[in-house]
Amino acid sequence: MSRVALLSLLLASLSAQAQKPSDSYLRLTEADGQGISGRWDVSLQDLDDVLGLDAGGDGAITWGEVLAREADIRRYVLGRLVLGAEGAPCALVSQGGLHIRRHSDGAYAVLDFDARCTGSAARLDVDYTLLFDSDPLHRGIVRVGAREPLIFSASQHFARVRLRDESPWRTAERMTVEGALHIVTRADHLLFLFALLLPSVLRRGADGRWVAVSDFGTALWDVVKVVSAFTVAHALTLVAATLGWASLPPRFVSVAIALGILVAALDNVRPLGWGTRWTVAFVLGLLHGFGFASVLAGMGLSTGSLALALLGFNLGVELGQVAFVAALLPLAFALREAPLYRRAVVVGGSVAIALLACLWLAERALGLGVSVT
Amino acid sequence: MFRRPSAARRAVVLATAWVLGCGRSPSFGEREPFIPRDTEEVLARVPAVGVDARARERAALRKALAGHAGQLDMALRLARLEIEASRVLGEPRYLGRAQAALRPWWDLATPPPGVRLVRATFHHARRDFPAALEDLDAVVKEDPGNVDAWLLRAEVLGIRGEHAEAARSCARLTALTSSLTVAVCEARVRSLAGHSRKAHALLSEALRRSERSQESRTRALATLAEAAALAGDAGLAERYFLRAISLDSKDYAARAAYADLLLDAGRAREAAVVVMDHTQDDRLLLRHALAENALGSSRAPEVAHALSRRFEESRLRGDSLLAREEARFALQVENAPEKALRLAQAVWVSQREPWDVRLLIEAALAAGRPEAARPALDFLQASGCEDPGLVFLAERVRSLLP
């Protein structure tokens, strides 16, 4: 046909189509106790396309023809859904007989099944791959509990969903842990804190050289100012960004963070005279807040618990920093008189941090791969 | 309240109940899962592999391709057959299957020209006009003798309201294909630009001179019919529509336009008859809903409900393909002019066909916000529209503006 038939086809179909392509409808609900039950509506037209239901070849799919292939239908459909709870896959077990339901574009087979999971199913991994290979326009419309439906497509076929709504306090608790973990597991935060902490047991003498501070209280107060300035600043931007009042492009934020670390580290080596360290911490905190916001956005928090979640996350960030400081400060204080500390640790460490920050800066500014964090 | 007595009314109710009971349109009702009583009950209709040679060929090609994924010729043939099926059956599932057939090439930045043309056809059908144009521009650059690409390019540009560039696309066809095909292309663009009388004259002359295949005649008749309708000659339009539909009963666009003509003339009962057996197509289901609504029939709520469900399910999957239909439904059935205006404005961003112009103006008028019709007025002025229906609407809305 090639040319001629396609020509006629174009001539004859010069109006855009207004139709709904293939969808399936999957509902997952938590049954009493541990189990999850599923009800999945899959179009008979789609099943015929992949399984050939129309045994008679007469173009009419009868209930008898569907029933005759019931086992194949179940195997095919259930084989294209993977549910997992905490990393362990759930076993999908058919329940009851096949039903039929009419949707706006025709008859659908309705499959009921149970998902038996070993782990707690409070959070569920859903990997949906039905029909994408034969029809990339297919969408899986998945409703979990009473939530807004999720739309699965060939390019986005995995999601992690919460079956149960957590209590707001539980959310806050979880977010506190997330916040603390976020601080202590990310290299750029730790190095940044490190750069600000190293000189806290010292002060600049009249000639600009480092002199050891006399008492622990002075060192501690210095650290508290720096850390709190950071926390207050990132709380401000985190709240603003999460509520949609302000935003910065992620690329800009990550570049600016690297730049900030570079400045903090260089300031240790030679004073730049750009203000006190807590103002540097404050500015960097503002930037980091935007970075946190993107982390939070990926967690799909419900709006109801958002305020407590934000509070928890900020608290966690502060606690993470305090823990880090509590571990390092006494050590730094004990070593403050040693020349080795000033030269090797403060200057050497700062130079190393500055170099790493340069590397990040190049990577992030030029978009070369993912950063080391 | 005055009530008409009875035997006649009872007959209508009984007849309605009978029609519903026989379930001629299985998409209505039955929202709960059920177990059919009879194993012989027909649940769905699909192409009959037993008698449909095209369906058999598609199945054979798919099977062959499953073993040899990289065979471009075979894949292209399958993709074209799938796209053809999507049109003939009014079923967009086949569009997705066409994409699946060309999977190895689909996402390439510079796929082979054949793939590009199918991809453009796909984007056009999905109303992603910028993507379609990008592919079409690339095809005509690589292969300036490609008739299909120039034709589709003219169509897409015409829908977007870029009439001059669309006309240039038609002009490129002169040396490449039959004069009737060129005339259909040019007439369609002129009609979209609001010069339907000229379009009609041009095309009827070309039709008289040509003795082309039935397919291009059918398309020519449908284009003529739409031009005559826009030019305000309803009688002539109706004759053309009837001929076009009798030649190709699957030309849903022509059927929809014919139903519109009847609805505008207050002949809702006939409009309902024209569309009622083809309501798997959303455009025709809309006309059915409008007709039943105009008749105030007892079926009206049922049909309107079925259409609402289609809108709902389409929205659920994240599509906005039905926005124009939804705007019209909101305006004429739901009496929700604000909603209609919002939808019409959303459609206006990507397309400017006569119906888009009309909906934007009508919705703006109904919502009491004539200033919202400004883009449509500017558009009509820029294209020098002469078609009486649109000119009349434009004057009405202009008289309300300061």
Image (cartoon, coloured by chain):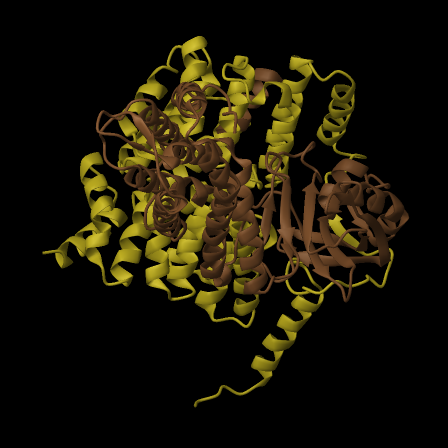
Chain colours: A brown, B yellow
Where in the figure is residue A311, as x and y percent of width and height?
45, 57
Quarter of the image with the N terminus of chain A is top right
Residue sitting at x 71%, y 40%: A130
Residue A369 appears left or right of B66: left
Q: Identify which residue, A50 or A252, lies in the foreground.
A: A252
Can residue B303 be seen at all in this image of the molecule? yes
Q: Position of residue B87 (x, y in %)?
A: 58, 36
Question: Measured along the vertical axis of the image, is residue A349 above or below residue B39?
Answer: above
| Quarter occupied by residue B400 | bottom left
Name which residue lies at 65% across and 65% down. B29
Q: Position of residue B109 (x, y in %)?
A: 50, 17
B17 relative to A199, above or below: below
- Furthest-left residue in this view: B402
In percent of the image, x 90 and y 48: which residue is there? A68
Q: Is residue B275 visible?
A: no
Q: Is residue A93 left or right of residue B248?
A: right
Tell which of B271 and B61 is nearer to you: B61
